[in-house]
């Protein structure tokens, strides 16, 4: 009886969270698209073999403090001083000192039969950026720290169709291979402005303002024998490619490839430990030079003023190692989390990169 009440409470809370986020989306104007594919992969993990609806609520937070040029570290003051070294007195340049990107995502996965499923992803993002502004005066540089207003709200919603093209069994599946195709809709605001009327940095906007396509391949392999009859080990490779298009301001976010390998070991019937390898390759952004009518500048570009507003400083190649844990509270409910540690980051131009990134999620099946 107590377990039944607990499960009903869990289901109610999951529905309440999803509903609250949907309502918040209607009332807020800004967010960020960073890490969208991570939301979708969480939804893929929640699909499983059972028919019907499952909800996954994911919270992730990324701290970015380190500044790289290629793979070499620079302090914000070094970047500013290098930029202003050959420029005249009165010149200014701005570099981020810290960026924090927090995202709450709801994935609704619905398996309509043994082979076909749909995943709807709704991200809600809270972004903060602290910056350092340098002004060249009489040959010296004066530094001032400033903070961007918090950006928060709904991001770009995506819908993914997933089909199992092979599996060895419908129940206690040990081998599965799935492919997917999807679309990301421009539902997030992408023309947020600061107090001076200039467009907020593109990477901090709610969305891209463009329709984008997604291709996904996901597999699962179980090995060994657990005492309950299931597999002792599971390996889950996954690849996702996002094909981006240009928005009406002439800006195109670079295409993105995510590749992941998750190894999971069952300590017991309800407790798993896992170690993931996560890779991200993102191409450079581009612009056709369209002018923003309000600021009179090329949309999202101000390379003489800011390191962020410059397509030359986009595109990266990153690899992370992510230890984590998964607890199967009941057949219908599970919680999991992981801490993502960067082991290799190589950027085009000069960029802020990830120092800390952690995930928490809860999944419930109806």
Image (cartoon, grey):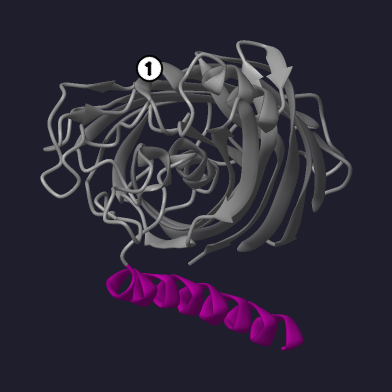
Find the magenta span and give its range: 1-28
- Magenta residue check for 19: yes
In the figure, is residue 119 to the left or right of 237? left
Q: Is residue 276 visible?
A: yes
Q: Position of residue 327 (x, y in %)?
A: 77, 55
In the figure, is residue 272 to the left or right of 221? right
Which quadrant does the N terminus fall into?
A: bottom right
Q: Position of residue 228 (x, y in %)?
A: 81, 44
> In terms of depth relative to the viewer, which is nearer, 291 or 207?
291
Q: Is residue 278 visible?
A: no
Secondary structure of the residue carrying tag 1 is loop
> In terms of depth relative to the viewer, which is nearer, 299 or 273?
299
The residue at the point 11 percent across, 38 percent down is: 248
> In terms of depth relative to the viewer, which is nearer, 301 or 296?
296
Task: Judge whether 340 appears above or below 11 on screen.
Answer: above
Main SS of the magenta segment? helix
Q: Position of residue 105 (x, y in %)?
A: 48, 56
Q: How many marks?
A: 1
In the figure, is residue 3 to the left or right of 143? right
- Disc 1: which residue: 284
> In terms of depth relative to the viewer, which is nearer, 102 or 323?
102
In the figure, is residue 188 to the left or right of 211? right
Q: Local crowd at mark 1 within 10 Å, few (<14), some, or many (≥20)?
A: some
The residue at the point 44 percent across, 70 percent down is: 18
Q: Position of residue 174 (x, y in %)?
A: 62, 29
Task: Judge whether 231 appears above or below 107 on screen.
Answer: above
**Extreme-front residue of the structure:** 138
- Magenta residue check for 140: no
């Amino acid at each position: 009886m107590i377990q039944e009440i607990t499960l009903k409470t869990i289901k109610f809370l999951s529905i309440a969270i999803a509903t609250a986020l949907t309502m918040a989306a209607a009332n807020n104007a800004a967010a960020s698209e960073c890490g969208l594919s991570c939301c979708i992969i969480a939804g893929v993990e929640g699909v499983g073999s059972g028919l019907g609806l499952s909800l996954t609520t994911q919270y992730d937070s990324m701290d970015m403090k380190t500044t790289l040029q290629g793979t070499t570290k620079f302090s914000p003051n070094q970047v500013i001083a290098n930029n202003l070294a050959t420029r005249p007195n009165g010149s200014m340049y701005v570099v981020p000192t810290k960026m924090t990107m927090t995202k709450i995502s709801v994935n609704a996965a619905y398996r309509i039969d043994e082979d076909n499923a749909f995943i709807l992803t709704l991200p809600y993002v809270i972004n903060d950026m602290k910056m350092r502004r340098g002004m060249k005066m009489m040959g010296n540089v004066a530094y001032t720290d400033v903070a961007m207003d918090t950006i928060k709200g709904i991001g770009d919603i995506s819908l993914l169709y997933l089909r199992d093209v092979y599996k060895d069994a419908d129940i206690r599946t040990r081998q599965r291979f799935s492919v997917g195709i999807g679309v990301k809709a421009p539902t997030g605001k992408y023309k947020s402005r600061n107090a001076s009327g200039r467009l907020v940095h593109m990477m901090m906007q709610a969305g891209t303002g463009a329709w984008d396509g997604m291709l996904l391949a996901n597999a699962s392999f179980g090995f060994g024998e657990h005492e309950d009859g299931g597999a002792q080990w599971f390996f889950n490779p996954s690849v996702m490619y996002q094909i981006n298009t240009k928005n009406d301001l002439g800006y195109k976010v670079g295409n993105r490839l995510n590749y992941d390998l998750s190894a999971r070991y069952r300590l017991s019937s309800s407790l798993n430990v896992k170690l993931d390898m996560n890779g991200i390759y993102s191409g450079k952004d581009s612009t056709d030079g369209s002018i923003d009518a309000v600021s009179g500048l090329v949309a999202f570009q101000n390379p003489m003023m800011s390191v962020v507003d410059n397509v030359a400083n986009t595109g990266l190649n990153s690899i992370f190692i992510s230890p984590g844990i998964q607890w199967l509270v009941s057949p219908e409910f599970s919680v999991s989390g992981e801490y993502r540690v960067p082991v290799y980051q190589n950027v085009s131009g000069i960029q802020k990169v990830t120092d800390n990134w952690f995930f928490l999620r809860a999944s419930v099946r109806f």
